[in-house]
Image (tube, rainbow, N blue to C red):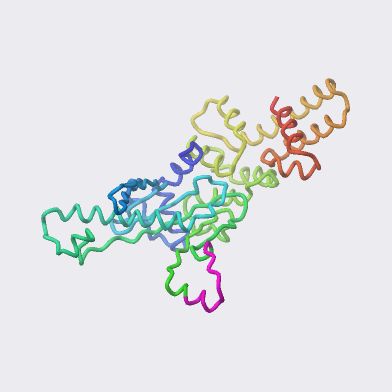
Amino acid sequence: MGRSNAAVKNWISVKERFADFYNGTVFDGRQVVRAEELQEISGESDLILRDKDGKAEELHRYRDVIMRWKGEMDLVILACENQEKVHYAMPVRNMIYDGLAYIQQMKEIWEEHGEGRKPTEDEFLSRFLKDDKVKPVVTLVFYYGEKEWDGSRSLYEMMDFGGEEEEQKNLKAFIPNYPINLVDVGRLGRLDGFQTDLQVVFGMIKYKGSRYKKEIQSYVNEHREYFGCLSWDDFLAIREMMNLNKKMEKILEKENKEVVDMCGSLDALCEDYREEGEKIGRIEGEKFGRSEGFQLAVKICKELVQCVNITDEELAKKYHCTKEEVTNARKMFAE
């Protein structure tokens, strides 16, 4: 797990937030899941598969955050491994992870029986007694990418059934579908169902992207009471979810404080970029004169000052140049 995913995982795994996430999405804001009823359990799952020759293959998977609720149900938040990217095989991934969670429960139930009851031949074969029950596993996909989710939301959407419509209908009757529970937090219609800081942070995520730079700054200042006094853990998670420039962290490190004033750091970041842009223009202008290539680089540098998160593809398209020219301009900007 990368540092960025770890920061978000730690942030959402705080039990008050975890409970609020489920209450706001699954229970329409009703306070059903409570923090004190949650128990964090291991997200690590193992499954050993053997072929007809007895050769074993181990299947090992990790879930980001998993909690047991009141001892009755496993609640899972599965954050995308790369938070900004769509996972186009998410239905299969969820299906495997949920299946492993059920297998883990079955193993635990079998071990709990011990020598207490002698299983029948059928029960011994399945390692599951006739009266045994597993607990439901509910998985939510916590997606906070900039672009709208355009991946499959169910197993059917990943399949190519082929054939005529009537044949497809017949096939589907025998093929179980597996929909995912996608929570695209940047596009939630209502946020009043959340009672913790999820409401403020999710409201900010809808402005994710370089074109919303001014909106982000305005939103943070409007919620100064929250963003003006963040813990480092909260700040690192928000920075990763918003894909904010890591230069902001360097600015904050100079302050050497235990709490983060994100309002002031955003202002400082913008001012720092403006000063650097002006400095680059003066130095490079004196050095290279007004050549066509340099003029293009200056334009790109000015664009980077205004939109720190703009991609190379967007720059190349906007200024009708090659990605190599954009790369050279970025190097000049970094210097």
Q: Which residues are magenta?
A: 158-170
Does residue 123 sit above or below 260 in this rendering? below
Q: Residue at x 22, y 56 (%)?
A: 109
Residue 220: which quarter of the image?
top right
Q: Is residue 305 visible?
A: no
Does residue 286 sit above or below 315 in this rendering? above
Q: Nearer the viewer, residue 56 or 136?
A: 56
Residue 322 painted magenta = no
Left or right: 92 in relation to 117: right
Q: Nearer the viewer, residue 69 or 315?
A: 315
Report the residue that reaches farthest toward the bottom. Answer: 166
Q: Residue at x 36, y 59 (%)?
A: 137
Give the x, y percent position of residue 303. 76, 38
Residue 113: which quarter of the image?
bottom left
Give the x, y percent position of residue 326. 74, 35
Give the x, y percent position of residue 18. 42, 51
Give the x, y percent position of residue 130. 20, 66
Which quadrant: the C terminus?
top right
